[in-house]
Image: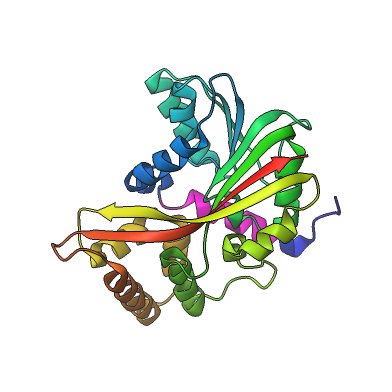
Amino acid sequence: MSTMTAEMQVLKTRLKATWMSGDYGHFAKYLEPGALEFLARLVIPPGTRMLDVACGAGQIAIPAARAGVRVTGVDIASNLIEQARTRAKAEGVGVWFDEGDAELLPYEDASFDLVVSLIGAMFAPVPERVASELVRVCRPGGRIVMANWTPDGHIGQMFKIIGKHVPPSPLMPSPLKWGDDATVRERLTHGIATLDTTKRLYPMRYPFPPADVVEFFRVFYGPTNRAFSSLDAPGRSALRQDLEALWSLNNLTSDGTTHVEAQYLEVVAIRD
């Protein structure tokens, strides 16, 4: 691997700080139903060696381990790894959690039967390295499964709005490209026997109205938290207005709660 430039090192440090801001463990509680739906579709036999890349606070790693899967979770955010370890211990579940980078996974070749990333590895800044690492640590005949927000889905629209107010780094391609079928097929070619993609909907339900959802994201979700904190008062007001309009537009309820179906691309690859 080539030596990282100083600019890329600064970007990666900033991205780590982004994911450590807010409180993703709390934020993800409302996302658990969709995470468990994703996990159930994997149909993982007990004893399977599974790696959860960008595992957050253990949203799928801990339930998988409870079902008898041999799970390792890895995430760049050290505070989330600590949350995951604390939760696993409290629930009496055996999971090994490591702090680590999706672009340089700290594992030997072919270490896992199943390599999974639920809305996680897509945010690493060098996607070609991510793809290479996902393949490298998966055993021949094993599965690589990703769930990635699509450009046109609700969360894709949300990130586009944020990018309009806070331009992203030119060093980093849009994470939403991981939600594009053609791009995924370009990235996951070497070492892959078969690859299938399916567009699915992720349920996002909150017991409060869209304006409060935006505030919830601002407080607890790292990227939104950092975007707001980088703006002055008029900028924050404009960003809030645009985000509230998006959540209101896509809200399927009219009872003071919020229910949005966010599109993602499910990627299932079989290692050569």
Camera-side residue: 224 or 144? 144
User: Does residue 104 appear anywhere in the picture?
Assistant: no
Q: Where is residue 169 in the image (x, y as percent from the top left)?
A: 63, 70
Q: Name the residue: 35% across, 78% down.
A: 242
Main SS category, magenta section: helix
Q: How is the image coloured?
A: rainbow
Whether residue 12 is in magenta: the answer is: yes
Q: Name the residue: 41% across, 28% down.
A: 87
Residue stretch in magenta: 9-22
Q: Where is residue 10 in the image (x, y as percent from the top left)?
A: 68, 60
Camera-side residue: 239 or 7? 239
Q: Name the residue: 85% across, 54% down.
A: 3
Point out the image quarter for the C terminus: top right
Camera-side residue: 37 or 27? 37
Image position of 249 (left or right of 178)? left
Q: Where is residue 252 in the image (x, y as percent from the top left)?
A: 25, 64
Q: Is residue 218 above or below residue 191?
A: below
Q: Is residue 260 above or below residue 166?
A: above
Q: Name the residue: 46% across, 72% down.
A: 162
